[in-house]
Image (cartoon, helix red, strand yellow):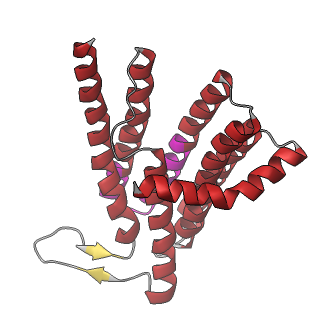
């Protein structure tokens, strides 16, 4: 319920912008492409930070997170614009889905490269697992619906994934700037720190990695049950 309420609240805030886009001739596909361009920019920021940023400089993560959140907002706007303007179409839905997958893969590419470059190897593995889970959540739904089953169950859908990555990245940069980039809690028997500043970013990705794959499996089981009822 809270998700629907939050979505409706956001739509109410966006409605004036939607009406402006309709008035000046902005199409849903333009917004979708702009969202892809923003995710490419976020990936470039992370790649730049990988090559030229210091290990303790989390400003690149913060900027990338902010861009990812704005790109996620575009994902809400394009669908709303399509419905309100009467421009919804099957091709538009396909175009949106394909570009969303490219956006997500590019986002995770930047994250993985950044983490590997700055020697956060374990975190980079979980980022890769999160990418796999994210794509499988979308693929399982698309394949099930292609076979006649509406399969939108599960918690870790695209909006949740974008919010987790975007908010945690932005928060990591803010904490690093104001409280320090070298916060560290170590335990003797652990080969890696129990907590450090970048954990604000990487631990949510760990949760996303697990939860996204669980969601994909939930959808697989849901589809199996529905097929058996047919």
Quadrant for the C terminus, please.
top left
Quadrant for the N terminus, please.
bottom left
- Give the answer, above or below, for where 185 lies relative to 3: below
Q: Position of residue 183 (x, y in %)?
A: 35, 83
- Using the rendered view, name the quadrant where residue 150 is placed: top left
Q: Position of residue 184 (x, y in %)?
A: 30, 81
The front one of 76 and 214 is 76
Task: Report if residue 124 lies within the magenta region.
Answer: yes
- Give the answer, above or below, for where 50 lies relative to 150: below
Which residue is most to the bottom? Answer: 179
Give the residues in magenta: 104-126
- Using the rendered view, name the quadrant where residue 66 is placed: bottom right
> Is residue 21 found left or right of 60 in the rendered image?
right
Residue at point 50% right, 59% down? 6
> Is residue 166 found left or right of 149 in the rendered image?
right
Magenta segment, prevailing SS (helix, strand or loop): helix
The front one of 157 and 121 is 157
Task: Report if residue 107 lies within the magenta region.
Answer: yes
- Give the answer, above or below, for where 138 lies relative to 157: above
Residue 34: in sight, yes or no?
Answer: yes
> Is residue 133 found left or right of 84 in the rendered image?
left
Residue 51: in sight, yes or no?
Answer: no
């Amino acid at each position: 319920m809270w998700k629907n309420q939050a979505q409706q609240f956001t739509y109410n805030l966006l409605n004036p912008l939607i009406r402006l886009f309709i008035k000046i001739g902005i199409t849903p596909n333009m917004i979708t492409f702009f969202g892809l361009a923003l995710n490419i920019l976020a990936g470039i920021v992370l790649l730049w930070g990988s090559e030229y940023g210091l290990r303790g400089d989390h400003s690149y993560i913060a900027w990338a997170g902010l861009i990812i959140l704005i790109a996620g907002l575009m994902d809400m706007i394009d669908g709303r614009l399509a419905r309100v303007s009467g421009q919804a179409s099957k091709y538009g839905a396909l175009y949106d889905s394909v570009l969303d997958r490219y956006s997500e893969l590019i986002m995770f590419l930047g994250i993985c490269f950044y983490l590997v470059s700055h020697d956060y190897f374990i975190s980079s593995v979980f980022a890769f697992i999160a990418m796999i889970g994210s794509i499988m959540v979308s693929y399982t739904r698309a394949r099930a619906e292609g076979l006649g089953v509406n399969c939108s169950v599960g918690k870790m859908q695209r909006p949740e994934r974008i919010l987790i990555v975007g908010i945690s990245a932005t928060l990591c940069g803010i904490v690093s700037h104001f409280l320090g980039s070298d916060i560290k809690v170590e335990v003797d028997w652990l080969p890696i720190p129990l907590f450090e500043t970048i954990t604000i970013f990487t631990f949510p990705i760990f949760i996303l990695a697990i939860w996204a794959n669980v969601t994909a499996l939930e959808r697989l089981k849901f589809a199996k049950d529905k097929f058996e009822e047919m």
